[in-house]
Image: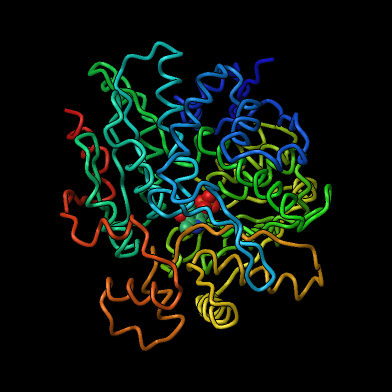
Amino acid sequence: MNLLYQSTRSNTAPITASQAILKGLAEDGGLFVPESIPALKVSLKELSNMTYQQTAYEVMKLFFTDFTEEELKSCISNAYDEKFDTTEIAPLKEAGGFYYLELFHGSTIAFKDMALSILPHLLTTAAKKNQVTDEIVILTATSGDTGKAALAGFAEVPGTKIIVFYPKDGVSPIQEKQMVTQKGDNTYVVGIDGNFDDAQNGVKAMFNNKALAESLKAKGYVFSSANSINIGRLVPQIVYYVYAYASLLRKGVIAEGEKINVSVPTGNFGNILAAYFAKEMGVPLNKLVCASNENKVLFDFFDTGIYNRKREFILTSSPSMDILISSNLERLLYLAAGRDSEKTLALMNGLSKEGEYVITPEMKANMDGITGGFATEAQTAETIKAVYEKTGYVLDTHTAVGASVYERYKEESSDNTKVIIASTASPYKFTRSVMEAIDPKYGSLGDFELVDELSRISGVSVPAAIEEIRSAKVLHDRVCKTEEMQEVVEGILK
Ligand SMILES: *Cc1c(COP(=O)(O)O)cnc(C)c1O
């Protein structure tokens, strides 16, 4: 049976998975959602004996039904290979009673690699399947991690170009260095004078600009998206929740069918939405904890049912979560409204015109499996320090938000269910904030001195991704104003 994809904003004819991957965003501005969420066909017991790649196939084949077995297996084996520094791909580490699902063993040491290492393969396969001969231009807004992971995934991929926009003053020094040193003739990196939401809005506006699409089409280009709104990113992210549950089963930590909780440091709501999908597929997950930093728009939303983006945008030590417009939440709204696209469209119009929307009590009730929480900068730093001092394990700033929020949830609820904390970045990506949280005395050291010191105190060797940029040359120095993003793109695609 072919599983088709529907826009969240209208009831136009549904399309295949490969078409949805190619388009990224629906023409009406909506996000693609599968017409139903498939149930796992194999038991978790069977899955507990499978490799990451085998698990990926069991999950993805249910969603990407118009890919052949051979195509899908080839995408999977090209993605989850030696680019990852462990054969487990997504290992679990226990520290202080929590199970950290380390999603940062790919080439750019953040969880974005989990999906962006496979997206280029899914996309080029999808292009072939649909007889697309135009060059695919990946247009991406990044809060820091997506950009580098997408650049790494698409660099030198024939038939593609990738253009990344990032907030010039809103990413960590290591994140910026990683991006501006990216090699590959088909890669373009542009800093903008706005924040992540500005970058994301600029990219969305280009996607929705029909005149621009036509003029590019005439030049042999077609846009696609590597942002987490692409279904080709969401689905690969479901895999690691299935794999993590099966790993706990294999290790004898949980019994078959035992429910566990998951805490996810959240920004654009992609990662936690994947956990939600895993739960709907039959993985015994109980509470999903949506952890925010001081940009706590999602906490307020789950608390009150009101989404209000009219607030100050705060730059924090967890920049990949500095977001006030959580794009993927639209998919949850659509599902919680009983797949009502009219309702979803009205809410999204409210967000863009008034800066806020209110959901119905019924919709709110349909979301009660998700609990929001947030951590202040001080709480995040305290958690990094406390976990390090108690266990020797060093958390990055984003993961620390997930752990900090979960600690308080546990205290307040007395819920003693075992928990997986999605560990979304290596501490090496945010070395300065991490080391200063452990001890303020580190403030005086340089970026790479800190890297070496982190290695010394944690006993974890410096990842290749960091070694590479120590001496790498800056290859990209484009900057522009938010209003100039389209001009920049047209300039690149002359
Ligand atoms: C992107 C990112 C997040 C947020 O993930 P979403 O899917 O956008 O919610 C959290 N932590 C890190 C390190 C990230 O790169």
Comparing 55 with 112, the one in front is 55
Q: Residue furthest top?
A: 131
**Residue found 65% across the figure and 56% down from its top:** 306
Left or right: 226 in relation to 380: left
Q: In this view, does 50 lie above or below 158?
A: below
**In the visual, does 84 lie left or right of 243?**
left
What is the quadrant of the C terminus in the image? Answer: top left
| Residue found 72% across the figure and 54% down from its top | 251
> What residue is rendered at 50% in x and 45% in y?
352
Judged from this view, the residue extending furthest toward the bottom is: 441
Where residue 344 sits: x, y (%)? 63, 37
Residue in the foreground of this view, choosing between 278 and 250: 250
Quarter residue 215 falls in? top left
For residue 477, side relative to residue 66 (left or right): left
Residue depicted at x 47% and y 59%: 425
Q: Is residue 268 visible?
A: no
Q: How many marks?
A: 0
Residue 488 image point, x, y percent: 21, 40
Indicate whether 140 appears above or below 324: above
Examine the image and state in which quarter residue 399 appears.
bottom right
The x and y percentages for residue 63 are 62, 27
Where residue 25 appears, as percent x and y from the top left, is 48, 31
